[in-house]
Image (tube, rainbow, N blue to C red):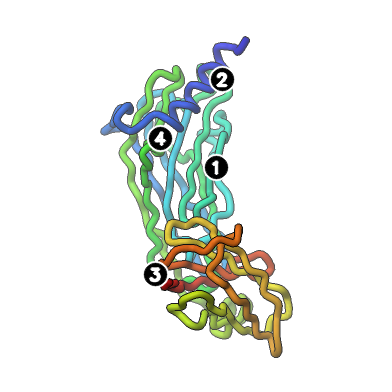
Amino acid sequence: MLSRELKISLLIVIMLIYVPVRGQIHSTTDTLRMIADTARPGTSVDVFLDMVNTFSVGGISFRIIYDPWRLHLSSVSLMPRAGMLTINGVDSTRAGVVRYFAVGPSPANDYVPPGRGLIAAVRFYVLPLAPEGGVPFAFVDSLLGDNSLADNTGLHVYVPVLIPDTLTVLGQTEIESEDTYHHVRIGLGNFPNPFNSSTVISFSGGFEKEARVEIFDILGRRINSLRIKPENRGRFAALWNGLDYLGREVQSGVYCYLLYLDNMPVASNRMILLR
């Protein structure tokens, strides 16, 4: 037999994941706010979530979109104010989207009391070739209503006021531009572009280690992965034949590719497939 506390915990998880927006209570006082600062290419930065809650919160769910061609998701962690909750899921299978939910193991006793403060930190790595400028973050709901707060009884789910923010990527310093993968020398691109059936993805920079290119569709779904070995004078090239992991032809459209060196994302670009 399941204990009452475990039943409530499971109920909160189910409600946070499956209750549609129309079945939730829209609050005008409870708030989830993103707090982003500044960062330089080639460094890590935390985007914090600040929560104002007027009731005891036993479960939290949020879905954030960001620019995957400038940022790489590293981790999601709870801040001390929400330390009594337990992370029950982090979904980052789509580039540019992170979905997260946490719930108290015994919600009747493990909950965030009413108040205000930071509850979570989402850490990103800023790609070394990320251009200078603003990187917006936004809360986005699917049909399931991903951004919500559940009370510690498992009976009510609230949609808080959602406040986005923008991270500012600063320009490179001279030292960084020398030390971080020789920025101006990478020259990531593909030819032909647009292409009909295949294209060659290439870059150069005097590197001798194997590289990897991840290919995504416009929705951020990973389509294929290419291992690239250096050719003459540090030039890298790999052929993509317009197939996915299972060897199936992908449809016409815009595709994005992300270059990894030493398992670190460093640059990105886009290509167009026209069948």
- Whether 189 is drawn above or below 163: the answer is below
The answer for how far apart the CA atoms under marks 4 and 2 are is 22 Å
Front of the two marks 4 and 1: 1
Q: Are marks 2 and 3 in contact (CB under 8 Å)?
A: no
| Mark before the other along the chain sequence, 4 or 1 | 1
- Whether 12 is drawn above or below 51: the answer is above
- Whether 116 is drawn above or below 275: the answer is above
SS class, disc 2 = loop
Name the disc covering residue 74, or none. Answer: none
Which residue is the extreme one toward the right? 208
- Whether 47 is drawn above or below 85: the answer is below
The kind of residue on which mark 3 rests is Gly
The answer for how far apart the CA atoms under marks 3 and 1 are is 28 Å
| Mark before the other along the chain sequence, 4 or 3 | 4
Q: Nearer the viewer, residue 138 or 234?
A: 234
The kind of residue on which mark 2 rests is Ser
**Residue 269 place in picture, x, y as percent:** 48, 73
**Residue to which mark 1 is pinned:** 90
SS class, disc 1 = strand
**Residue to which mark 4 is pinned:** 116
Q: Are marks 2 and 1 in contact (CB under 8 Å)?
A: no
Residue 177 visible in the picture: no
Local packing at callout 1 (Cα closer than 10 Å; few below 14, some 14-19, many 20+) is some
Give the residue drawn at x 58%, y 70%.
259
Name the disc covering residue 106, or none. Answer: 2
Quadrant where the image shows the C terminus: bottom left
Front of the two marks 3 and 1: 1
Residue 114 visible in the picture: yes
Q: Nearer the viewer, residue 268 or 180?
A: 268
SS class, disc 3 = strand
